[in-house]
């Protein structure tokens, strides 16, 4: 398969596929003309990477997960650790977002939103 075919199959842009090759996540074969020739294993890896990235895993997490996927002697505990670490980062981001929402909600509620220059939102943003 060529890169256009693989892009259609995986839903990944060709630019992303080239990037994954550049950083060593995939290694498609090259024809005599220099064009990439993707095998089914490349297609599978790209689908795997697309799903992992959609779940927010970092490139380094994806590298680790791919290595674990290809290691038939892996311990599932190693995979679970990567996923648990990522889940903890997501939960921390959610907590931060909730805190930001609550603060902003309070500031919006405190602002009269009229023609006067007094604004608690700007006052709060001006303090460290």
Image (tube, helix red, strand yellow):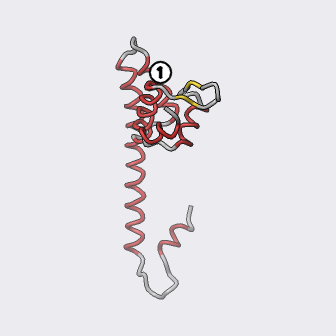
Identity of the residue drawn at 44% across and 42% down: 8
- The residue at the point 56 percent across, 43 percent down is 15
Which quadrant holds the C terminus? bottom right
Residue 123 placed where, x, y %? 52, 72
In percent of width and height, residue 103 lies at 41, 62
| Callout 1 secondary element | helix
* Foreground residue among 39 and 87: 39
Q: Nearer the viewer, residue 3 or 11?
A: 3
Up/down of 96 relative to 66, above or below: below
How many marks overall? 1
In the rendered view, would you say 59 is above or below 128?
A: above
Q: Along the horizontal axis of the image, is 32 left or right of 96?
A: right
- Residue, far front: 33
Left or right of residue 128, residue 105 in this image: left
Q: Residue at x 58, y 37 (%)?
A: 19
- Horizontal arrangement in the rendering, residue 28 relative to residue 68 (left or right): right
Q: Quadrant of residue 74?
A: top left
Say few, some or many: other residues with alpha carbon within 10 Å of mark 1 (under 14 / 14 to 19 / 20 or more): few
State the residue lying farthest toward the top.
73
Q: Give the image location of residue 20, x and y in percent.
A: 55, 34
Name the outermost residue toward the bottom.
115
Q: Identify the residue under disc 1.
A: 67
Looking at the image, is 2 positioned above or below residue 109?
above
Q: Is residue 101 above or below residue 57?
A: below
In this view, which residue lies farthest toward the right? Answer: 33
- Tell which of 113 and 58 is nearer to you: 58
Where residue 88 sits: x, y (%)?
Answer: 39, 37
């Amino acid at each position: 398969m060529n890169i256009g075919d693989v892009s259609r199959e995986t839903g990944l842009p060709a630019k992303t596929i080239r990037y994954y090759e550049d950083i060593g996540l995939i290694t498609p074969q090259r024809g005599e003309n220099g064009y990439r020739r993707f095998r089914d294993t490349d297609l599978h890896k790209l689908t795997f990477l697309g799903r992992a990235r959609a779940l927010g895993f970092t490139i380094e997490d994806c590298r680790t997960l791919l290595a674990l996927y290809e290691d038939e002697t892996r311990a599932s505990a190693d995979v679970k650790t990567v996923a648990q670490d990522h889940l903890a980062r997501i939960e921390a981001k959610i907590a931060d977002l909730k805190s930001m929402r609550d603060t902003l909600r309070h500031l919006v509620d405190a602002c009269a939103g009229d023609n006067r220059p007094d604004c608690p939102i700007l006052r709060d943003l001006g303090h460290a």
